[in-house]
Amino acid sequence: MLFIKEDLKTNDTQVQVLAGILNVCALVGSLTAGRVSDWVGRRRTISLAACIFLAGSVLMGLSPNFGTLLAGRCVAGVGVGYALMIAPVYAAEISSAHIRGSVTSLPEICISFGILIGYVANYLLAKLPLVYGWRAMLGLGALPSAVLAVAVLAMPESPRWLVMQGRVEQAHAVLRRVSDTAGEADVRLAEIKTAAGLADDDDGSPRGVGKGVWKEMFLHPTPPVRRILVAAFGVHFFQHLTGIEAVVLYSPRIFKAAGIATRSEILAATIGVGVTKTVFIMTAILLVDRIGRRPLYLSSLAGIIASLACLGLGLTVVERSVPRHSPTWAMALSIATVFTFIASFSIGVGPITWAYSTEVYPLRLRAQGASVGVAINRVMNAGVSMTFVSLYNAVTIGGAFFLFAGLAVLAAMFFYFLCPETQGRPLEEIEEVFGRGWRARLLSWDEAVVELPMSNTTDGNTKARP
């Protein structure tokens, strides 16, 4: 952003449009990706997303002017919509219940690691002449895209998608590859077949994948489906209202407002943001299947609220001080709370939004439901990124973060009252949790375990699901 503005002489409005247009175009990708993945499979959809990314990166890297850059950003946005929808869906459908939270959080850790690499690359590429530097920063994104487009074809297809296609034997073969024992693969296949409406002795035939899904979701939803949609769409709605996009995308401006002056110092500070984000998402992956989604998410929001309030206070004091004579404590508080905010977001709200919203859908609704969730996520992302500069010009930068703190309080209330725990449950059983009504949120996990169905072990005995 800093280099593009200097080279292409863009104004604040153009910067906001460039930042947000990717997410607007992601709507196109996210709303079509679900149907495409039901048609061609999860694996090929990932490859398609990578190809779209590749085209967008090449276009941005070779752009001679703002219009071409904007067009490349739009193409990349379509790829974003595809990738954000299909990655967590594939991860959820390929993994077993006891590691699903960690596995579905992997796309988030990989995104954060990519951002960190981007920060480091930008720091190094900033030494190039201005005309080449920012183009190299954007164009190099074509390399990992090309690797992903080819390498993903060596991975197994989603067994749940294969069952919905009537390819039960292929699904069983995949499950044997990704399960700890043959007995676990048999149990998982039986659960998937039941959820897909296949009898145990049915070899399968295509189930009309993707047909009637929108009608079931929006015209005639059952009470459990209605509760699922409120929970899944709601976590996407609130994720960006915590202000994460504003902090990540505009962290150079925040650091500058807090007193970090030189471009080299600002870029170094943004690398610190990337390191913090990556480390705490890795921590979340280790914890999400141990302590559950709800404790981690709500603890994360508590940290976000405190950080945003302190960040708003620090920036307000800095902004109202005499230029270059801001209190040291206010500048230190502003810089420190950027990092505590990133840490709080990354240990809960960031990864759990994607894990939770993916796993709550029934099999028949998962791909297209996830598409709508990603579309909501991108709308909120675009809304924040395209209006933040105007917002802080209107209410001051400190006031903007006080506003985000208030919205985070609403997010905590929403998740506490409307989103029950899903830790450790097979995907095929989560609809039952929502079938019990909103009061399911009040069940502790220990109480919920005794209500779980019994499952057969490999030795023929029965036991409660872990």
Image (cartoon, helix red, strand yellow):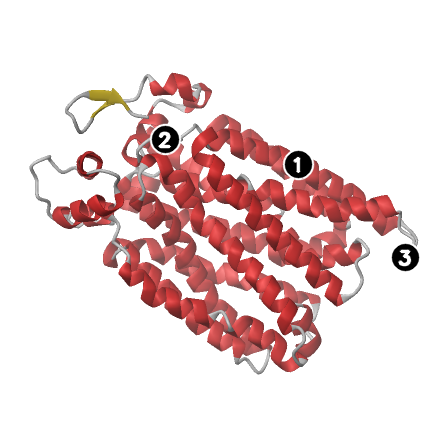
- Sequence-wise, the earlier of marks 3 and 2 is 3
Q: CA distance from mark 3 to mark 2?
A: 54 Å
Q: Quadrant of the N terminus?
A: bottom right
First in residue order: circle 1 vs circle 2: 1
Q: Residues within 10 Å of mark 2 (few under 14, many from 20)?
A: many
| Residue 111 appears in the rendering | yes
- Indicate the position of residue 118 as horizontal and vertical percent values: 57, 64
Q: Are marks 3 and 1 in contact (CB under 8 Å)?
A: no
Q: Amino acid at mark 1?
A: Ile
Comparing 83 with 8, the one in front is 83
Question: Residue at the spot x=10%, y=35% of the render?
Answer: 200
Q: CA distance from mark 3 to mark 1?
A: 29 Å
**Total labels drawn:** 3
**Kind of residue indicated by mark 2:** Gly
- Residue under label 3, please give it: 324
N-terminal-most mark, 3 or 1: 1
Q: How far across and down, in percent of the image, does residue 380 sit? A: 54, 50
Q: Quadrant of the C terminus?
A: top left
Q: Is residue 168 left or right of residue 271?
A: left
Q: Which residue is mark 1?
A: 305
Judge left or right: residue 320 versus residue 19: right
Residue at image position (31%, 27%) is 432
Q: Which residue is mark 2?
A: 424
Q: Give the amino acid type for the residue marked by disc 3 in the picture.
A: Arg
What residue appears at the point 48 percent right and 72 percent down from the top-left corner? 57
Q: Is residue 406 visible?
A: no
Q: Which mark is residue 441?
A: none
**x, y (%) of residue 428?**
27, 34
Quarter occupied by residue 364: top left
